[in-house]
């Protein structure tokens, strides 16, 4: 059974939010994504305006179909907008070719999904090494696993790990490339409450220690308290945005 991680000193209590400074990491203006055409047309995003900053932890809330995952896929270079402006630093993600998008995904973005997507025949360490072998400036697989407190389990296969441990291997795999951006789509959706808290602690630790912009999609409004900013989506656009003065540690969330 998973045991809660010992949090780093900065997350021992609520951490005061540091206001974003400098140029945004992402600049999003009038972002639109349309699937299909004619009667089958679906407007997944309808004019999203948003800035995201280095080191932030952002939670995206909203009902199914509100555009959260489409936005995440556009930010991660997994999909291309239909219209609008989407800049990552000086890279225009709306017009980048597939070579540039592949390089961007490989070197800049870490992805964490609801399901772990580990290779069953590889150990935890070997699953992480799949990334370290292709990344530009990776940390070692051992260090990545230590960051999520799985060093002692590095030689275990996925079938020998609990659900929470498997998700933490997936986090280690995502952060091993030292990403500037960590995109998490319902990372606790397949986990029970206790295990979910352990996973959120790992994500918080990565955000704080690596300074990685972290964006989390969730249906669980309770998770909003751990964020710097909470962005509520509805009908393909930002409905409203809330800024937290302090960030609550995952262990204090009132599930």
Image (tube, rainbow, N blue to C red):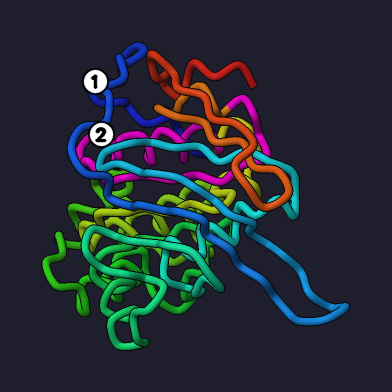
Q: Residue furthest left?
A: 137
Dominant SS type (magenta): helix
Residue located at (51% from left, 21% from top): 225
Residue behind mark 1: 10
Q: Can you say which quadrant of the picture contains the C terminus?
A: top right
Q: Which residues are magenta?
A: 196-222
**How many marks overall?**
2
Residue located at (42% from left, 50% from top): 168
For numbered disc 1, what is the local secondary structure?
helix
Q: Quadrant of residue 13?
A: top left
In the displayed structure, 220 sits above or below 123; it is above
In the displayed structure, 123 sits above or below 58; it is below
N-terminal of the pair, mark 1 or mark 2, is 1
The spot of residue 183 in percent (x, y) is 43, 54
The spot of residue 235 in percent (x, y) is 73, 49
The spot of residue 251 in percent (x, y) is 47, 21
Q: How many other residues sit within 10 Å of disc 2, few (<14), some (14-19) or many (≥20)? A: some
The spot of residue 90 in percent (x, y) is 21, 63
Q: How many other residues sit within 10 Å of disc 1, few (<14), some (14-19) or many (≥20)? A: few
Q: Nearer the viewer, residue 85 or 55?
A: 85
Residue located at (44% from left, 18% from top): 244
Residue behind mark 2: 208
Residue 119 seen in render: yes
């Amino acid at each position: 059974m998973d045991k809660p991680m010992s949090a780093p000193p900065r997350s021992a209590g609520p951490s005061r939010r540091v206001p974003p400074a400098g140029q945004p990491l992402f600049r999003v203006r009038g972002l639109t994504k349309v699937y299909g055409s004619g009667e089958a047309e679906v407007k997944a995003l309808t004019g999203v305006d948003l800035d995201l900053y280095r080191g932030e932890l952002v939670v995206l809330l909203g009902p199914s179909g509100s555009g959260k995952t489409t936005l995440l896929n556009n930010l991660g270079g997994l999909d291309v907008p239909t219209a609008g402006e989407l800049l990552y630093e000086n890279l225009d993600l709306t017009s980048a070719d597939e070579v540039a998008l592949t390089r961007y995904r490989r070197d800049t973005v870490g992805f964490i999904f609801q399901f772990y997507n580990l290779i069953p025949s590889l150990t935890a360490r070997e699953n992480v090494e799949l990334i370290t072998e292709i990344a530009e400036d990776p940390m070692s697989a051992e260090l990545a696993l230590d960051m999520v407190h799985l060093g002692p389990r590095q030689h275990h296969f996925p079938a020998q790990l609990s659900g929470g441990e498997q998700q933490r291997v997936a986090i280690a795999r995502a952060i091993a490339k030292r990403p500037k951006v960590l995109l998490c789509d319902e990372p606790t959706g397949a986990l029970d409450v206790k295990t979910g808290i352990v996973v959120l602690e790992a994500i918080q630790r990565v955000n704080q220690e690596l300074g990685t912009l972290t964006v989390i999609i969730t249906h669980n409004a309770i998770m909003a308290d751990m964020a710097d900013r909470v962005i509520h989506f509805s009908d393909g656009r930002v409905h409203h945005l809330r800024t937290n003065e302090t960030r609550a540690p995952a262990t204090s969330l009132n599930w």
